[in-house]
Image (tube, helix red, strand yellow):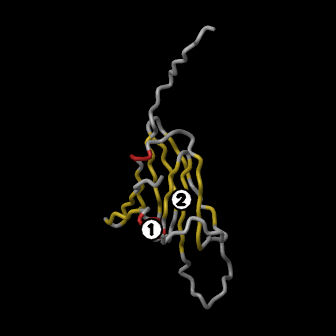
Amino acid sequence: MFNNISVESNNNNVDFFSALEKEKYNWHEHDAEGQLAVDIAQNKHELIIVAPMSGTPPEKIGLHLQNDLLTIRGERVSPAYYNSKHYHQEVYWGKFSRTIVLPCDVSYELAKAEYKNGVLVITLPKRMIEENIKIMVIDE
């Protein structure tokens, strides 16, 4: 199930899933991808995922949230000259992704994402569930 997560960048709202709906982003490509580094934090009410994506334009970012999995995909292109060879290269350029198993249930309909200064911050409110589960005992 796709969620309508939007991002704010330079005072423009960008719908991460609009690219999916227009089939610009192929989730099933089998090319090699870099793995996105993420930080995951939580407090009593929400999960916060932070992913630095410097150099990635907002229209090249896709989010997919289904059950307890969050997948972040993107692509960034090197600003280096194409007619030159790298002397030294540490930064990954190209397609990247990361799938995260969420540690708790979240209210996906209230999820928010903000992309600012090359950093994506996703806020997922925790789903509050009753911890006391009543069990009916049936005597035979």
* Residue at (63% x, 89% y) in the render: 84
Amino acid type of the residue tagged 2 in the rendering? Ile
Percent position of residue 5, x then y: 41, 56
Relative to the observer, which residue lies in front, 82 or 126?
A: 126
Left or right placement of residue 36 versus residue 22 in this view: right
Name the residue furthest top: 139
* Residue at (48% x, 52% y) in the render: 1
Name the residue furthest left: 11
Marks 1/2: CA distance? 13 Å
Percent position of residue 70, x then y: 54, 52
Q: Quadrant of the C terminus?
A: top right
Seen in the picture, residue 80 relative to 29 is either above or below; the reply is below
**Which mark identifies residue 72?**
2
Amino acid type of the residue tagged 1 in the rendering? Ala
Q: Earlier in the sequence, mark 1 or mark 2?
A: 1
Seen in the picture, residue 81 relative to 114 is either above or below; the reply is below
Seen in the picture, residue 42 relative to 130 is either above or below; the reply is below
Image quadrant where residue 98 sits: bottom right
Name the residue furthest bottom: 83
Q: Secondary structure at mark 2?
A: strand
* Residue at (47% x, 42% y) in the render: 106
Percent position of residue 27, x then y: 56, 65
**Which mark identifies residue 19?**
1
